[in-house]
Amino acid sequence: MKSMPTRHPPLKAVATVFICCAFLAIVSLAAACGQAENRETPAATGGAAETAAPTGTPAPAGAVPGVSDSEILLGAEASLSGTLGAVYATIPQATNAYFDYINDTQGGVCGRKIVYRVEDNRDDPAVALEVVRKLVERDKVFAMVGSLGDVPHPASWEYLNQKGVPDILVSAGAHRFGADPQGHPWTVQMIPSYTVEGTFFGRYISQNLPGKKVAVLYQNDDFGKDGLAGVKAGLDPGKNQIVAEESYDNTAVSITSQVANLKKSGADVAVLFTTPGFTAQAIKNADRLGWHPQWLMSYVNSDDMMFQFVSPQLLEGAITFQALKLAGWRDDPAVARHYELMQKYGGPTPTNFTIYAQTLGEVAVETLKRSCDNLTREGLMEAVESIKDFHSDLMLDDVTVSFSDTDHTGLQSGHVLRAGVDENGKGKFEYFGPLFVFEGGSSR
């Protein structure tokens, strides 16, 4: 294999996509064996039915960081505390429960138990870098899997790519994390790019709401700015115009003035690239002002917990996206098994986010299984890039996950969700419309 730690595949601008998954990173075994390795990506195989068998355990204990004769140590930095922790901490918790299930029922992967060590980044870049340094330099993790947070991850993203440590299945949708496989070859994104999501919002508006005035409220960081850029790219200027743009900092207490300015613009449609707390503020403030636009809100809000923040009646009609089965589908066999797994292995109460977390864990396990004959950091990257059309039973029937050395975002398709009210007055989300597939920054 050719020497790493940097990989330089032909640069190909890939605007990757939509809801939930991706993986990447590699570290050369050259540091362990004192000589360069040449690398060829193995031929792509099929989906979940074609899982590579764990045929060997060639890496001797201690030769590769985080790999012993009995364990594979994985790490993650995630927002576990504060406002975002209250919403998203269940994601690494549910992934860990799935790993415990694999350890219990399958003896782990490659003859080794999976150990998952998650550190709180407190949604702070400086803290994220500090805890990732600890995981890499002191704890000696094999790879980072499922790190979470658009604000904190850029600092550790740079560090991990400099160190040649796999940074895979990142739960952060900033466009940068999946769009630079040449400059940051060790990072792979699990969830879709907000730029592409915004592009779809724009196209949806022009196709279904022509002539309506559009306003955008966005967080003043990669999350919001990428979403705004996408909306502008997707709108047909002959059909719709953006009449107002308002931003807020993620440390803000109130967005009352921003919502008032959006209302004054006379917008009929409001696109929200906002996290759940600010989404709730926006909708409630608009209602107090007597403003009721058609809401489109980023997929970071696509969970029933939104009905705890906003009444079902106020949220009714709001549009968002997903690619997975919903936690409310208790009669679906895969969802029912998810509930059983979470209960038995100490996971959180199931939500749409925990269903996403289990699919992340499934992709991680699939990747590890494919690397058993080359259980090195580089072997892990070759394995993730070999995955094509992986399907989990928790995904919608027409949704799959794929990776390559030029495409580092996994989920690239999904369906529209609309918030509604059931016969008992409780909130619910329902899918409608065709499958949307994102390819090279476009949707179809």
Image (cartoon, rainbow, N blue to C red):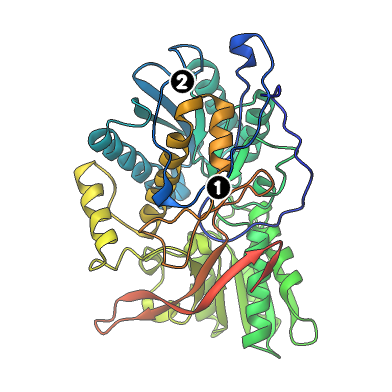
**What residue appears at the point 50 percent right and 12 percent down from the top-left corner?**
63
**What residue appears at the point 35 percent right and 58 percent down from the top-left corner?**
393
Distance Cα–Cα, label 1 vs label 2: 21 Å
Element on which disc 1 rests: loop
Which quadrant of the figure contains the C terminus?
Answer: bottom right
Judged left or right of residue 191, residue 179 is right
* Residue 204 seen in this snapshot: yes
* Number of other residues with Cα within 10 Å of mark 2, as a class: few under 14, some 14 to 19, many 20 or more: many
Residue 8: image x %, image y %?
A: 76, 35
Judged left or right of residue 347, residue 297 is right
Q: If you read the primary sequence from the N terminus, does the residue marked by circle 1 or circle 2 appear first?
A: 1
Amino acid type, label 2: Gly
Of 188 and 51, the residue lying toward us: 51
The residue most toward the bottom is 211
Of 36 and 230, the residue lying toward us: 36
* Residue 86 seen in this snapshot: no
Residue 405: image x %, image y %?
A: 66, 43
Element on which disc 2 rests: loop
Residue 242: image x %, image y %?
A: 74, 77
State whether residue 117 is above or below residue 224.
above
**What residue appears at the point 42 percent right and 54 percent down from the top-left corner?**
356
State whether residue 108 is above or below residue 251.
above
Report the residue marked by disc 1: 22
Which label was assigned to residue 414? none
Amino acid type, label 1: Ala
Report the residue marked by disc 2: 66
Which quadrant of the figure contains the N terminus?
Answer: top right
**What residue appears at the point 76 percent right and 53 percent down from the top-left corner?**
13
Of 260 and 86, the residue lying toward us: 86
How many dots with numbers?
2
